[in-house]
Amino acid sequence: MNEPLFWLGLSLCLVATSLTAVLIALIPVVQELSRAARSAEKLFDTLNREFPDTLEAIRVTNIEITELSEEMKGGVKSASGAVQKVDRTLINAKKQVESAQTKSKSFWIGLKTGFQTWKNYDKS
C-alpha cells in the first residue's frame, strides 16, 4: 500500500473515468445547445426581416395618432367657442326677457294708474 506508482495510476484511472463520464453527460447538453443556437438564429433572421417593417408601421401609426390628436384639439377648441357663443346669446336673451318683463310691468302699472286717475277724475 505504500507504492506511490500504484496510487498515481489509480488516481489517473479515476480521473480518466470521471472525465469520460462528464464528457458522456455533456453530449446531450451540447446537442440541445446547438438546437437552441439554430432556433435563435432563425428567430434573429425573422426579426431582421420583420422588425424594420414593424417599426415603420409603429412610426406611421404614431404620426397618424398625432394628427388625429391635433384635429381633436382643434375640434374641441371650435366646440368650446361655439358653446361660449351660445352661452353669451342665452345671457343676452335672458337680459332682454328681464327688460321686457320690467317694461311690461311698467306698462301695466302705468295703464292701471291712468285708469284709476281717469276714474277718479270722472268722480270729481
Image: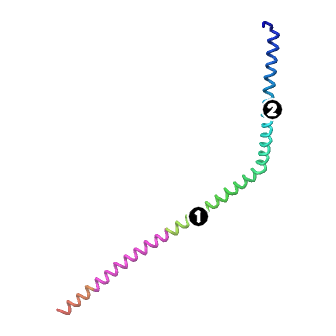
Q: How is the image coloured?
A: rainbow
Q: Looking at the image, is 12 positioned above or below residue 79?
A: above
Q: Nearer the viewer, residue 61 or 27?
A: 27
Q: Is residue 12 magenta?
A: no
Task: Name the residue located 77 percent from the left edge and 45 percent from the top edge.
Answer: 43
Q: How many residues crowd mark 2 within 10 Å: few (<14), some (14–19), many (20+)?
A: few
Q: Report the predominant secondary structure element of the magenta stretch.
A: helix
Q: Residue furthest front?
A: 1
Q: Secondary structure beneath disc 2?
A: helix
Residue at numbered disc 1: 74
Please report whichever mark, 1 or 2, sits nearer to the chain's N-terminal start. 2
Q: Looking at the image, is 22 positioned above or below residue 41?
A: above
Segment tinted magenta in the rendering: 84-111
Query: In whole angstroms, how far apart are the C-alphas of marks 1 and 2?
Result: 68 Å
Q: Is residue 101 magenta?
A: yes
Q: How many residues crowd mark 1 within 10 Å: few (<14), some (14–19), many (20+)?
A: few
Does residue 111 appear left or right of residue 36 in this picture?
Answer: left
Contact, mark 1 vs mark 2 (Cβ under 8 Å): no
Q: Nearer the viewer, residue 109 or 41?
A: 41
Task: Name the residue located 55 percent from the left edge and 64 percent from the top edge.
Answer: 77
Task: Name the residue located 35 percent from the left edge and 78 percent from the top edge.
Answer: 101
Does residue 117 appear left or right of residue 69 in this picture?
Answer: left
What label does residue 27 carry, if any? 2
Q: Secondary structure beneath disc 1?
A: helix
**Image quarter of residue 17:** top right
Residue 52, how many percent across, how many down? Answer: 75, 51
**Image quarter of residue 109:** bottom left
Q: Amino acid at mark 2?
A: Ile
Which part of the image, by quadrant, shows the N terminus?
Answer: top right
